[in-house]
Image (spheres, rainbow, N blue to C red):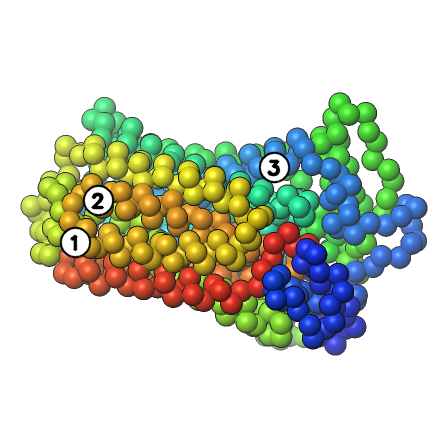
């Protein structure tokens, strides 16, 4: 288990930013930002004992293991997991134009449906985030991805709206665990100088999942051959689409179970030196295959809390006292995040996560429905002034153009992903985050202003390309702004906040889509503008060492 850093410990304030080597405690470099962490000497043991002749820090051991085949394999496996989460989240948006008839959904019901997975993610985000900092990254990834895939697939045979809603909620609990953990796990294998670009490359797989979901919807949902009877259930093509969308999560869980090791950073913090060394040996062997190099013997500077160290809560106190102690431990990471030098960045990140999640998910989940309503031309809000009757809706034959347009918008993520990979280590996550939020705000405002479907499609593609830069920059910043013992808990907490925002955004769109469409669209533009301005107060973390 992790041992949290206590403020009473003796601390060695050591700047982690590139090019900063000798700053006094009260000084900072105006170009590089503030000191990111105070390193504590109490939880890291780096003596010269043991059989190994030398002891390496985490960053030194990662560098010693090299960079190569292992990291590319890691990118593929983690990337597929990231893509599977995207598929599971976004598949609901492609169901709306057809499933609304089979499940008899009003616009408010559709808002609840798109919000259900985010509610599950909110519940799962912090729960999994806490468990992963205590039990390990890999184990939680396998379980959360399995939950995601199993319950997502079961939703395909739900005959009633309430059951479909419940199963999507449980699937969301799984997604809430895997999204923040994937980036923590991945970053802890990466050499410092390659971390920003590789995390950006990992983030591009969200685009791949987006494109996969849109492509599957385009290929499957409009097809009449995919319709058959399953007992009393009329199994329409959109139900087959739901089944197919659960496959990436299940295969991803299997890949992690069979191929991937535990994070060496977690093992070091937990005092499991031998296991961490074995992971570094596997990394070196794969990276240096065919180069004729041998990994020299070494020890590691490990966390002082050993795996077998007993905890007071296991041996003392009543059940109520143990429960209170457990709750206190669960809430401790939040207290640490909003205390001392981490307070300002935590408040800023909370605002940024809320703004981008409300704006992106609130609007993105409704793009297929908006374009379905725009088939006769006009702006997104031009044809939604009056609520439509469920009895008069016609979902069949399915309009293929809706899914083609969704695919085009999803594919427009590509330029933004390429730009992020190339520029993240040059400009830093802070600059990309702020600028992309401001441009996203402008594009959404113009979507409301324009009057033709083509103009709306072009601006939606611009929003897609720019907003993905925001998420990529946020992924990089999130892994570098917090130390190991808080990293997954922090990401879980902020993604939980993001899920609250996503729920509010989807409910707002569902409630107002038929009556006052302008309100949620302009609110999205305003929140993105706010997030872009708040992001300016975050510290720069370009090529920062992980602590």
Residue shown at 77%/37% (left/top)?
281
Q: Nearer the viewer, residue 502 or 38?
A: 38
Left or right: where 40 falls relative to 206: right
Can the viewer see residue 34? yes
Circle 3 crowding by C-alpha within 10 Å: few under 14, some 14–19, many from 20: many
Task: Name the image quarter holding the C terminus.
Answer: bottom right
Residue shown at 35%/54% (left/top)?
440
Mark positioned earlier in the residue sequence (1 or 2): 1
Q: Nearer the viewer, residue 36 or 148?
A: 36
- Label placed on residue 381: 1
Measured Cα–Cα span from mark 2 to mark 3: 40 Å
Specify the quadrant of the image occupied by residue 226: top left
Residue shown at 14%/35% (left/top)?
396
Q: Are marks 1 and 2 in contact (CB under 8 Å)?
A: no
- Label placed on residue 28: none
Left or right: where 328 falls relative to 383: right
- Label placed on residue 455: 2
Task: Tell me the element at label 2.
Answer: helix
Residue shown at 11%/50% (left/top)?
383
Measured Cα–Cα span from mark 1 to mark 2: 13 Å
The percent position of residue 121, horizontal first and vertical second, equals 43, 55
Mark positioned earlier in the residue sequence (2 or 3): 3
Circle 1 crowding by C-alpha within 10 Å: few under 14, some 14–19, many from 20: many
Task: Tell me the element at label 1.
Answer: loop
Left or right: where 358 falls relative to 348: left
Q: Can you identify the residue that label 3 sits on?
A: 74
- The label nearer to you, 2 versus 3, is 2
Circle 2 crowding by C-alpha within 10 Å: few under 14, some 14–19, many from 20: some
The percent position of residue 210, horizontal first and vertical second, equals 38, 40
């Amino acid at each position: 288990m992790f041992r949290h850093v206590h403020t009473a410990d003796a601390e060695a304030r050591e700047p982690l930013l590139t090019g900063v080597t000798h700053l006094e405690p009260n000084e900072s470099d105006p170009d590089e930002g503030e000191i990111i962490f105070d390193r504590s000497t109490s939880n890291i043991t780096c003596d010269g004992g043991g059989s190994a002749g030398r002891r390496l820090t985490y960053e030194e051991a990662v560098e010693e293991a090299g960079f190569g085949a292992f990291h590319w394999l890691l990118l593929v496996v983690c990337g597929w997991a990231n893509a599977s989460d995207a598929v599971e989240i976004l598949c609901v948006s492609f169901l709306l134009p057809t499933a609304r008839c089979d499940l008899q959904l009003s616009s408010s019901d559709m808002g609840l449906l798109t919000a259900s997975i985010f509610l599950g993610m909110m519940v799962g985000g912090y729960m999994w985030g806490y468990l992963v900092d205590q039990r390990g990254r890999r184990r939680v990834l396998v379980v959360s991805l399995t939950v995601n895939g199993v319950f997502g697939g079961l939703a395909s045979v739900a005959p009633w709206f309430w059951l479909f809603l419940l199963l999507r909620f449980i699937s969301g609990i799984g997604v809430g665990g895997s999204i923040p953990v994937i980036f923590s796990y991945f970053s802890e294998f990466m050499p410092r100088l390659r971390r920003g670009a590789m995390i950006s490359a990992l983030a591009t797989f969200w685009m791949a999942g987006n494109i996969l979901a849109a492509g599957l919807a385009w290929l499957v949902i409009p097809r009449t051959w995919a319709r058959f009877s399953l007992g009393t259930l009329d199994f329409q093509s959109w139900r087959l689409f739901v089944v197919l969308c659960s496959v990436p999560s299940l295969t991803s869980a299997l890949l992690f179970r069979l191929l991937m090791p535990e994070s060496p950073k977690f093992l070091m913090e937990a005092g499991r030196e031998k296991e961490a060394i074995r992971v570094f040996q596997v990394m070196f062997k794969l990276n240096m295959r065919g180069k004729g190099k041998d990994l020299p013997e070494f020890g590691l500077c490990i966390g002082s809390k050993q795996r077998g160290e007993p905890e007071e809560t296991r041996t003392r106190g009543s059940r109520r006292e143990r429960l209170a102690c457990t709750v206190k431990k669960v809430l401790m990471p939040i207290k640490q995040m909003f205390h001392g030098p981490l307070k300002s960045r935590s408040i800023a990140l909370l605002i940024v996560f809320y703004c981008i999640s409300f704006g992106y998910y609130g609007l993105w989940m409704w793009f297929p429905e908006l374009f379905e309503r725009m088939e006769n031309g006009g702006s997104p809000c031009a044809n939604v002034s009056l609520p439509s009757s469920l009895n008069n809706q016609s979902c069949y034959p399915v309009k293929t153009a809706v899914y083609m347009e969704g695919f085009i918008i999803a594919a427009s993520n590509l330029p933004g992903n390429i730009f992020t990979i190339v520029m993240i280590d040059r400009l830093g996550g802070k600059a990309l985050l702020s600028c992309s939020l401001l441009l996203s705000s402008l594009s959404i405002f113009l979507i409301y202003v324009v009057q033709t479907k083509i103009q709306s499609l072009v601006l939606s593609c611009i929003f897609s390309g720019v907003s993905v830069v925001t998420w990529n920059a946020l992924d990089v910043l999130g892994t570098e702004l917090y130390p190991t013992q808080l990293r997954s808990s922090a990401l879980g907490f902020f993604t939980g906040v993001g899920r609250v925002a996503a729920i509010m955004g989807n409910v707002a769109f569902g409630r107002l889509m038929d009556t006052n469409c302008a309100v949620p669209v302009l609110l999205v533009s305003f929140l993105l503008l706010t997030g872009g301005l708040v992001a300016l107060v975050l510290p720069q973390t370009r090529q920062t060492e992980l602590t």
